[in-house]
Image (spheres, rainbow, N blue to C red):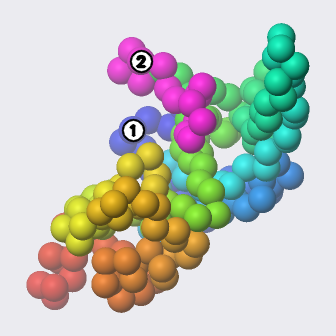
């Protein structure tokens, strides 16, 4: 596995990310590369993907004959099968600081793809814009975005943007996510960390 201090050249990281994205696309309505690869950093430490998984609908009945709809995530099913296959290049991420890496939740899984760490996040169509902004980063850019949401009277909870009355603000595109707080659109390569922005301003 790539160590926390080890970074991968962008070209190699993008090649791996595109390969994994394409292999997982059959189980997704939409899946894109996010993180530092999308920002075009010269070297990266991991791969980040954001997906809208396809769902398989199943109708079940309880003991009293009442029908209940159950939706199964095809993406999680595909990953479960892939990591169970002997010799697979896709593996579960080992524990982090003695704690199991995310796997059993509904919104995130941590993986290894050819020994490179992968963060796989999920969204819905109505949360896609804000989630793509946040998952593209960098981290302090995303943190600043969430802080400004709060200042403008919104909350970011469970991947949703909520207004002051607790109603969801649907954000289908990144441009809509920027507009919620009055930010002008910035290309991923223009989204700088606080430290990088200070350097750029000083030059």
Position of residue 31 relative to residue 98, above or below, is: below
What's the residue at 62%, 57% (across, down)?
124
Magenta region, main secondary structure: loop
- In the image shown, does 109 or 8 lie closer to the viewer? 109
Foreground tag (2 vs 1): 2
Q: Residues within 10 Å of mark 1 (few under 14, many from 20)?
A: few
* Residue 125 lies in the magenta stretch: no
Quadrant of res 150: bottom left
In-image side of 202 versus 183 (left or right): left
Q: Residue at x 23, y 72 (%)?
A: 152
Left or right for 28, reference 59? left
Q: Is residue 105 magenta?
A: yes
**Secondary structure beneath label 2:** loop
Q: Could you tell me which residue is drawn at 36 percent across and 42 percent down?
A: 5
Query: What residue would you read off at disc 1?
Result: 4
Q: Quadrant of the C terminus?
A: bottom left
- Kindly report the distance in space between the C-alpha atoms of the residues bearing marks 2 and 1: 16 Å
Which numbered disc, 2 or 1, marks the residue that appears first in the sequence?
Answer: 1
The residue that appears at 48% across and 79% down in the rendered structure is 176
Q: Is residue 15 visible?
A: no
**Is residue 200 something that shows in the picture?**
yes
Disc 2 packing (10 Å; few <14; some 14–19; many ≥20): few
Residue sitting farthest toward the left: 202
Q: From which residue to which does the magenta span run?
A: 96-109
Q: Which residue in the structure is indicated by mark 2?
A: 99
């Amino acid at each position: 596995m790539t160590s926390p201090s080890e970074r991968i050249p962008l070209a190699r990281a993008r090649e791996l990310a595109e390969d994994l994205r394409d292999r997982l696309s059959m189980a997704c309505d939409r899946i894109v590369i996010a993180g530092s690869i999308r920002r075009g950093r010269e070297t990266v430490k991991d791969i980040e993907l954001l997906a809208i998984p396809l769902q398989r609908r199943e109708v079940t009945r309880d003991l009293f004959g009442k029908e209940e709809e159950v939706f199964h995530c095809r993406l999680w099913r595909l990953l479960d099968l892939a990591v169970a296959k002997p010799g697979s290049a896709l593996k579960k991420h080992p524990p982090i600081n003695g704690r199991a890496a995310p796997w059993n939740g509904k919104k995130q899984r941590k993986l290894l793809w050819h020994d490179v760490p992968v963060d796989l996040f999920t969204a819905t169509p109505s949360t896609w814009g804000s989630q793509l902004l946040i998952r593209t980063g960098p981290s302090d850019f995303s943190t600043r975005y969430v802080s400004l949401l709060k200042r403008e009277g919104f909350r970011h909870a469970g991947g949703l943007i909520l207004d002051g009355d607790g109603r969801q603000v649907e954000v289908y595109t990144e441009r809509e996510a920027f507009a919620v707080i009055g930010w002008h659109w910035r290309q991923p390569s223009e989204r700088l960390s606080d430290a990088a922005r200070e350097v750029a301003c000083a030059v």
